[in-house]
Image (cartoon, rainbow, N blue to C red):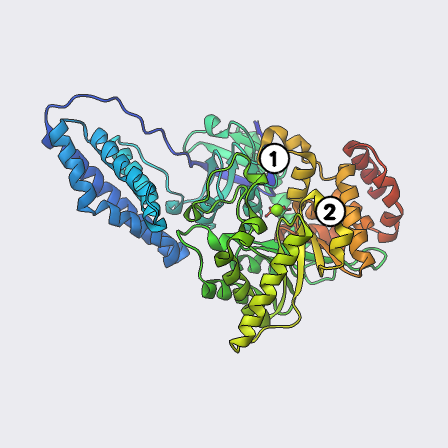
Amino acid sequence: MIQGIAASNGIAIGKAYQLVTPELTYEKKSIDNPNKEIERLEDALQTAKQELEQIREHTRKQMGDEHAEIFSAHLLVLDDPELVNPIKDNITNENVMAETALEKTTNMFIDMFQNMDNEYMRERAADIQDVSKRVLAHLLGITIPSPALIDEKVIVIANDLTPSDTAQLNREFVQGFATDIGGRTSHSAIMARSLEIPAVVGTKKITDAIKQDDMIIVDGIAGDVLVNPSDDELAAYKAKQEKFEKQKEEWAKLKDEPTITADKEQVELAANIGTPDDVTSVLSNGGEGIGLYRTEFLYMGKNQLPTEDEQYDAYKSVLEQMNDKPVVVRTLDIGGDKELSYLDLPEELNPFLGFRAIRFCLENEHVFRPQLRALLRASIHGNLKIMFPMVATLEEFRQAKGILLDEKQNLKDEGADVSDNIEVGIMVEIPSTAVTAKQFAKEVDFFSIGTNDLIQYTMAADRMNERVSYLYQPYHPAILNLISTVIEAAHSEDKWVGMCGEMAGDSIAIPALLGLGLDEFSMSATSILPARTQLRGLSKEKMVSYKDKLLSMSTTEEVVEFIKEKTE
Ligand code: PEP
Ligand code: MG
């Protein structure tokens, strides 16, 4: 059994699909028949073309024209005589293998395009690189896995799944996944929860231990993966799977019930989403609002920025589907483990501490303003609240809000309708902001605590690095004290506080957060009903009475023991 980090609930049983880019190495040999090499090249080009056409068609059907665009660009590269002819010339003139000529010629073009000032041309370099890899693989007789082409039920095995890989996965066929790297709050884990598929991450060695088509079990509840299980194991996990399904039916009974504690105190249970499609699952899981709409996904899986109108359509769709329930939209939080290749940002040594989120938006108003305009225009379609990510100083908040108000005025001058009741808040993800929450509370309309980042910055432990994942300690007294500071500061100014980090849906954290006075808990849609069940059995008054004791504890272990003892 391979152990990892339980990232998304449920049990998946099925065939493994290795999503690993194979090594494309070969031995250089001298050739005696250049014509034969040209023929091999033409065959490989032809196969690559057929494959790309198939991928483009699949992607278009599953995900729409926009996602398919990238493959049209790849097909254009394959058909370009200005690229293909020099490869053939190279074979005849230098008497080299098709592989060598392909690499030499494409590398020359890649270098040339990469060094151009024009962003469009730089993107072409990436296209040539991708296409060249695909053709080289065919010359070597190797197949490159294409997630978009999966058309049978499988469990995906990968070193890591980037958010754009995950966006390409077809929910109908991908039953679950397991990765080598990542933690509970890496974005692959978060996506798995929103796709409602079982996942185990951070196993360190899954790609080595599993072969294509092995029969595997992914236990996303315990964080275990079993390879080629025995009949007994299979039966035991099928029973566990059934029990989990039954439990889900029990939870579902509370779908339309309010979230009230045993002593009749009400809190709000909201959901985190990444796309308008996720709203269906929020509603079917009884979500009372959206506490975090991660808009980054609108910017991913394509090769250019989304237009203002595209964004407007997405925001309007979410607001309308939620039918006047609160929807908190976070402005672009790019950076960290969420990259946008077309923005061509320089690589950084510490991306999580780098030029990301609001820092990037304040310096790139041509990206920030269209998003704010799209949000403001959509505001008349529901109950919109806007929040800025990764705010470290009050000046950043003031500057961001200033740009928002500026665009609001512009839209009004243009005769557009904009709501006058949009709350504007911030995410509390950086310790400096938590510590000075009192000062922020005078100016913001609300806080939403992003514990995924707040914990990594407070404990100085990269959330993507499984070797330090033991320091992801949501119940550590340092974290509880920061959360309490934020809640007290907000309440003293009559402002509300939500939490949209993964901690909000954690069954050990929930009683503590109730006691600290949290108003809104925002989590993966699938955690809402278990959380509602739990909250209905808790007394808020009792939890509040434990607050001082909890805040004065010394270790995570003490906190956990105390909470378990008091909630049994
Ligand atoms: C967080 O940091 O807690 C958060 C909700 O934002 P993200 O996970 O998208 O960084
Ligand atoms: Mg964050």
Q: Position of residue 365 (x, y in %)?
A: 51, 57
Left or right, 83 with respect to 230, comes to: left
- Residue positioned 25% across, 46% down in the render: 77
The amino acid type of the residue labelled 1 equals Asp
Check if mark 1's residue and mark 2's residue have beta carbons within 8 Å.
Answer: no
Residue 24 disc label:
none
Location of mark 2 (residue): 434
Judge by depth and name the residue closer to the eye, 3 or 14: 3
Left or right, 282 with respect to 535, comes to: left
Q: Secondary structure at mark 2?
A: helix
Mark 1 / mark 2, whichever is N-terminal? 2
The local crowd at label 1, few if under 14, some if 14 to 19, many if 20 or more residues have their Cα within 10 Å, is many
In space, the residues marked 1 and 2 are separated at their CA atoms by 19 Å
Indicate whether 102 appears above or below 380.
above
* Residue 5 placement: quadrant: top right
- Residue positioned 47% across, 35% down in the render: 157
The amino acid type of the residue labelled 2 equals Ala
Indicate whether 532 appears above or below 456.
below
Judge by depth and name the residue closer to the eye, 488 or 273: 488
User: Is residue 381 something that shows in the picture?
Assistant: no
- Asked whether mark 1 lies closer than 8 Å to ligand 1, one says no
Q: Secondary structure at mark 1?
A: loop
**Looking at the image, is mark 1 or mark 2 nearer the viewer?**
2
Location of mark 1 (residue): 462
* Residue 141 placement: quadrant: top left
Indicate whether 519 appears above or below 405.
above
Q: Position of residue 111 (x, y in %)?
A: 30, 37
Q: In which quadrant of the rendered image does the C terminus lie?
A: top right
Judge by depth and name the residue closer to the eye, 291 or 351: 351
User: Is residue 282 something that shows in the picture?
Assistant: yes
